[in-house]
């Protein structure tokens, strides 16, 4: 079983970070713990919405399938991050597919319990403030993918997924990186090779080391054509 107590996970999560200890305990009493296995499908795009998930351990890939059948990894949720909260509010079908990347555990909160929490004004204000941020972030990412050149997109994704550091280390596969950038893998590989030549990243086996994060930040702000 996970070593982190549900109450600690909730208090460290973005979604419930603004609630009091007593309110967090009330939420924790409504949650269940679910162990996860690598490759496990939590839900698919278009499924009915019935639960909110908060990552305790491991990570979960959030992916989208376009009308043309093209897959894009929208986000990789890690410890403390929530999944599926928007669909619980509007009762619309799931807008994304969620698959376990690294095995671990999740806190599960059913839709009926989630909605009952919104009857508490303080909890409702805290949750709605976070959800507004989620929507803004989603809109900003969509705009970013549509308007920025590939070099900027690759730099942005590397910076957003860096662990540890300095220097930060990125453990994404090239396939994951390509799907997060909305580009073909060979094109992303060419960008990575260019970054290595510019000495803003280095490779440590399958791990990408951000040896010059300031340089990478500058690339992430680039505009113009591909």
Image: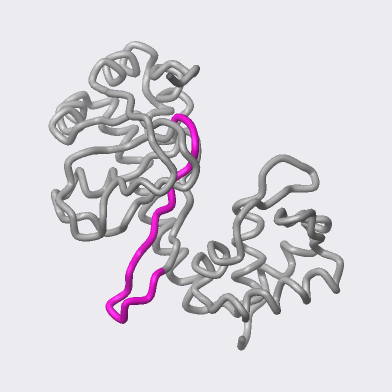
In the image, residue 63 above or below residue 56: below
Query: Residue 194 in magenta?
Result: no
Name the residue at 37% across, 23% down: 19
Q: 199 left or right of 191? A: right
Q: Position of residue 201 (x, y in %)?
A: 79, 62
Left or right: 7 as drawn, with respect to 163: left
- From the viewer's perspective, is residue 150 above or below residue 76? below
Choose between 22 and 28: the one closer to the eye.
28
Residue at image x 53%, y 62%? Answer: 176
Residue 213 position in % (x across, y down): 77, 56
Splitting the image into 4 quarters, where does residue 105 fall?
top left
Q: Main secondary structure of the magenta part?
A: strand
Taking the spot 41% from the left edge, 39% from the top edge, the residue there is: 37
- Foreground residue among 100 and 114: 100
Q: Residue furthest bottom?
A: 225
Residue in the picture at 81% in, 69% down: 196
Residues in magenta, as a range:
56-71
């Amino acid at each position: 079983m996970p070593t982190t107590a549900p109450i600690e996970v909730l208090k460290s999560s973005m979604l419930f970070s603004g609630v009091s200890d007593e309110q967090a305990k009330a939420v924790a009493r409504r949650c269940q713990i679910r162990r996860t296995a690598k490759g496990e499908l939590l839900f698919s795009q278009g499924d009915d919405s019935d639960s909110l998930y908060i990552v305790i351990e491991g990570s979960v890939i959030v992916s989208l399938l376009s009308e043309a059948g093209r897959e894009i990894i929208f986000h990789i949720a890690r410890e403390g991050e929530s999944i599926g909260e928007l669909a619980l509010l509007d009762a619309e079908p799931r807008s994304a597919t969620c698959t376990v990347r690294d095995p671990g555990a999740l806190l599960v909160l059913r839709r009926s319990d989630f909605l009952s929490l919104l009857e508490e004004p303080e909890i409702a204000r805290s949750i709605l403030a976070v959800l507004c941020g989620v929507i803004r972030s989603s809109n900003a990412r969509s705009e970013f993918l549509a308007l920025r050149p590939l070099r900027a997109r690759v730099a942005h994704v590397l910076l957003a997924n860096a662990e540890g550091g300095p220097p930060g280390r990125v453990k994404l596969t090239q396939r994951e990186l390509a799907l997060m950038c909305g580009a073909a893998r060979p094109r992303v590989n060419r960008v990575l090779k260019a970054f290595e030549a510019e000495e803003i990243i280095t490779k440590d086996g399958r791990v990408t080391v951000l040896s010059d994060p300031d340089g990478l930040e500058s690339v992430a702000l680039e505009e113009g054509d591909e």
